[in-house]
Every structure is written in structure tokens, then in C-alpha cells.
Image (spheres, rainbow, N blue to C red):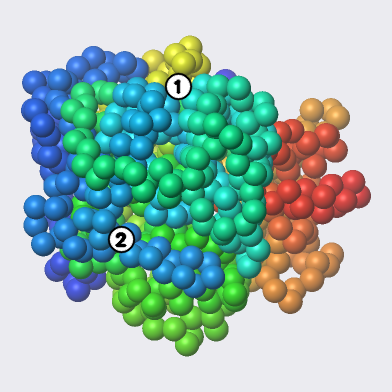
Amino acid sequence: MRNFQEVVYMVPRKIYPPQDAFVQQANYTTEREVFDDLQFWEEQASRLDWFAPWDQVLEGEFPFVKWFVNGKINASYNCLDRHLMSWRKNKAALIFEGEPGDQKVMTYKDLHRETSKFANVLKELGVEKGDIVTIYLPVMTEAVVAMLACARIGAIHSLVFGGFAPHALAERIKDSQSKILLTADGYWRRGEVIRTKDKVDEALEECPSVETVVVVSRVANAIRMKRNRDHWYHELMNYADNHCEAEVMDSEDTLFIKYTSGATGKPKGVVHTTGGYLTGASSTHYSVLDIKEEDVYWCAGDIEWITGHSYTVYGPLSNGATVILYEGAPDFPQKDRIWEIIEKYGVSIFYTSPTAVRMFMKWGNKWFADHDISTLRLLGSVGETMNPEAWTWFYEEVGKGRCPIVDTWWQTETGSIMISPLPGMTSLKPGSVATPLPGIAAEVVDDEGRPVPRGRNGYLVIKKPWPSMIRNIYKDTQKFLDTYWSVFDGAFYTGDGAYVDEDGYYWISGRVDDVINVSGYRLGSAELESAVLMHPLASEAAAIGMNDKNKRSAVCIFVTLTEGASPSEALEQEIVERIVEEIGSFAKPERVYFTKNLPKTRGGKIMRRLLRDVAEGRELGDTSTLLDVTVIDELMIRGGK
Ligand code: 6R9
């Protein structure tokens, strides 16, 4: 049996109780007793507009469940039509800022009209209810229009990250067998045009299923248009009728599929449904992100990421929010761009990732010193563990000690936030994701599926169905069963390790597949990294378990330094000491690599398996999901030392 090591890491840390000014206006302020999960979820679903009510809240058991059985609903209707009945119709729904500084505002009425027109275009092109539409677009209003247009007619969208290489795109198209692809001629990145359409042409050589390509003109560069296959978006829109009734969908009809990041192997098409998914995204956007009518809301990730689906598109728009979309790089033309945008539009809620926060911290406070960012009232984080140092910097320097930080744990598979502080009622502990939300039955268990005592590491599982849960892996029910349901009986396996502290707070220790086993002790990569980051000169860190030729596992650390610092033996020693100090001498790393950058997916996740390859001197595995491939060349040189 594998032993989970007792956490030696429970040092008391500062706790931040909710502040009165925030509590007084918060959407959720009193501890809800979750008397009854089904009643709770029924209330949440009732926040949406249904064409016909459900006759049963939940049917079936893990893993095959149905929510809001026989309820009829349309996601596009909930994000658009229902806002047109009030003054909201001329409220800004989307504010787009292009990297070159251009700006475009779409009101709810505009977005409704464009979506209806594009829904008619899709129909004209032969797209029917249940068909899959691949969307390979950069951050732009047309990406949102395209998603909502699919939802409007009951087509299933599959978004692929605009930065992916042709082969990664082709892999996803081939798996979904979609016949139609939406793309753009290109987009702006650090002042250069990224030639998206060229990549599409290359990918489509491998994908005979695609018969139609619709191209949005963004950068007006010269591109090849293939006769009978490729069409300009604006030309098709010219002739389209602007009335399109939203299709009546069953609650359990598929809304979209979303290929998972690929940080841990071949991408899988996660299937999400209409009623349950929208209930989860909309209600958590209200409770956790605390959205108000007058907020300017910015979730600074790609729309393609599940975070973009739930918290740039479906959550905020179903709640009638004003949403910022930014096309470009955070450091273009210089490192104050994020703060400049916050000032320019008066952003009040800013939801980002720990990777971004660490980067802003590394760049330094001088970049926002001259910007008025006092409109901020709530900060959020998702994607990885936020180390306490970055948390504290974000809280004190960006939030000026006024703005709660919601560190939200969830996954592509969960569809919406599962574990997080509720900003009007939860005391915050830097580095912890606080407690499961109402209606979510999270638990930490051992190898046998038994609950572990507090303070002990184990596997994070979910014990009861929730509305926005994954329903299947597209065309691969076996993989669905094997991946999530074969590890423990009657519980959803998240693949993450966690422990619960003496106050019932959850601490995510990283993917279980990132667990490092040293001399029988199990270490979470997140704990090691957090320890390294306590060194003032360490900017980012990744910890992996490296096997030597005797199959002995050892800790190996990759670290990037703050600007101006340079690697030295003394520094290496100091970093080792931090780990020994924070965790214990058994966790002492075998090697510390200093590197300029770490390999990451577009979601900002460190690709530890590539680092493992480097450390063990192996040929690199699949790098198709890597954001910046040049990182690898540099690592290879170091790995070979
Ligand atoms: C939303 C999203 C899911 C994995 C998840 C976990 C990690 C996400 C986290 C976090 C620590 C948080 N993760 N949020 N780890 N603290 N607040 O990121 O979805 O791309 O599917 O990744 O991300 O390891 O299992 P996805």
C-alpha cells in the first residue's frame, strides 16, 4: 500500500476575514445550510429562463446522471434574449480591446443581432442540430458570436486554442469529425501578425472531413482562400437574416465538447450538457465572482479554455454582465498593458491565473504605479495552486488590502467552480482554495477510498453528482469510465491530491500524477514549489520526480529567477535549504536547474512531463500543446549537463 506522508507543512499562516465593506454588498453573505442538495440546485436552475420546467431534478447515479429531466432550455436565449426585455438591451455586453489599441463595444442588442445572423449563416451552410462546429479563433467578439450561434441552433461547438500548431488542431478535428471550421486570417501578438489561416490550411490537409471554412477578417493580410471551401465571414453575414428563433433544447442535449489541455497525455473531448452546465456556470459566477449589474468584469484567459467558456461567455452573459475581451500579450507595447486596460475601462472584477500573477510580481509594482486601478473590488485565481507569496503580493499590492481573492478550484470536467471561498463570508488563507461550495460533496480519501484524517494528503474526489459535471468523453464511453470512475467506487476521481486542514480548508497539492515519491514519502509538486518560491530571488518553480537508472526517485527542481538575479552555487544551496526547512530533509532535491522560462500550456500549466523527460535525458514527448517551443531548446542544453 502506498503511504501518504503526514503533512509537515501546517504552519499557522495569516488569515484574512471578510471585510465589512465587501460583506455589505456581497451576493452571498450568510452561511447556507445545505439542507438538501437537490433543493439547492433546483433553486440555482430557477435563476435561468426555461421554456418548459423539469419534472425531476436528478435521475440516475454516478457516472450516468441526468439533471433537470425533460426541462427545455436554450443557452443562447439565456445569454441574450432575456436581457432584451429590460433596459439591459443597450448595456455593453462585450468590450473588445485589440492589441494595437483598437476598441469595439457590442451591446446585448448588438450581440443578439449578430448571433442570430450567424446562426442563420450556419443553417445556410447546412449545419444542423447535433452537428459539431470547430471554432479556431483568437480572442475576438466573433468567437463569442460563433459559440452563441451554435447554441442557438443546437449545434455543438468545439473550441481549439488559436495558438495551437496545425497538428494539434488536426488531431482535435479528426477526433470530432466536424465538417465545418471557423477561423480568422490572423491576429496580433506582440506587434506581429500571427498567420492563423496558414496553420488551418496545413491542418486541413490531414482532415478530409472538413467541407466548409468560414474566415473572419481581423488583420487583412493576404491569405489563400480555397474555392468552394473557404468563405469570408463578413460576406456571409451581409446576406443573413437577423431573426433566428432559439431552438428548444432538452436540458441534457450537448452544449459543447471541450478537449482537455493535454498537459497529461492525449486530448479527450469532454462532453457538457445545456441545462446542468449553464446552471453551474451561471450560479457560481453570481456567488463566487459576486457579479453586480454595474461591474466591469474581466476574466483574462483564452475563450477556448474551459475558464473562458464558463467565466467569459456563459456565466457572465447569462448574468447580464459587461465583459472585457483582450486580444494580445500582457507586455505589449510594455509591461503595464493589463493595468492600463483595468484603468481604461474601470475593471472591477479581475479573474486570472497564478502564473500571470507571478509574472506581474516579477515585473514589479512600478508598472501600475502610474495607473489608477482603484476600481478593482474582487480578484480571482484559477488553474494552479497560488503560492502564499504571490497571493500576498496580489492581495496587498494589486488589491491594496481591500479586495478579496477567490482562489477557485475546478476542472474542465467539473464545468464550473467546485471549491472556493465565497468572498462575502469566507475568511481567506493564502494558498488554500477554502471549502467546497454549497451542493458540492468533495472529500479527500486514501488508496482504499476511505476518508483520510485531517492534515493528511490523499486523493480529491467528488461523492455526489452536480449539474455541470462531465457526461461523457466524446465517442469514448470506455475512456470516460476508465479515467474517472474506475479508481474509486461511486466517486468522481479528479486526479488531484489535497488535504483538509484543522479548519476544514482544502489545500490542493497538485495532480496526483505529479506526485513525487521519494523513499516512500509522497510529495506534492505544489508544496515543493511553494517552498522554493519563498526564496526572494525565485520567480517560478517546477518540481518533478526524476527516476535514476536504479529506478530510485529523486526530487528535481527547475527554477526561474527574478530580473537581475543570476544563478550561482550559493543560490542553489539556499534553495535546497528552503525545501529542507519547509518540508524536511527527505525532500532534498537531487538537482536544481536554473532556467529562463518553464514550458507551459496555453492555460498556463507547467508541463512537468516534459521536464521529467529533460531531467531523465529522454527524447521529449508530445510538445503540441506547448505555448512556446523555444523554451525546450534551452532546457535541453541544461538537461544535458
Ligand atoms: C479550470 C481549469 C484542471 C486542473 C485541476 C488542478 C488545477 C485548477 C486550481 C488548480 C490548484 C486551483 N487547478 N484550479 N490547482 N488550485 N485553484 O483550470 O481546468 O484546464 O481542466 O485544469 O488544474 O490540477 O485538476 P483545467
Instruction: Please name the residue that numbered disc 1 is placed on.
Output: 473
Amino acid carrying mark 2 in the image: Met
Number of labelled discs? Answer: 2
Inter-mark Cα distance, 2 to 1: 35 Å
Amino acid carrying mark 1 in the image: Ile
Q: Position of residue 327 (x, y in %)?
A: 50, 60
Identify the mark nearer the N-term, 2 or 1. Answer: 2
Q: Position of residue 380 (x, y in %)?
A: 38, 59
Q: Is residue 614 left or right of residue 479?
A: right
Q: Is residue 381 left or right of residue 595?
A: left
Quadrant of the image containing the N terminus:
top right
Depth check: 534 or 273 in front? 273
Instruction: Please name the residue that numbered disc 2 is placed on.
Output: 106
Of circles 2 and 1, the one toward us is 2
Within 10 Å of disc 2 (Cα), the crowding (few <14, some 14-19, many 20+) is some
Q: Find numbered disc 1 in the image and state the secondary structure of the residue it sits on.
A: strand
Depth check: 423 or 532 in front? 423
Relative to 507, residue 334 above or below: below
Within 10 Å of disc 1 (Cα), the crowding (few <14, some 14-19, many 20+) is many
Residue at 21% x, 42% y is 243
Q: Find numbered disc 2 in the image and state the secondary structure of the residue it sits on.
A: strand
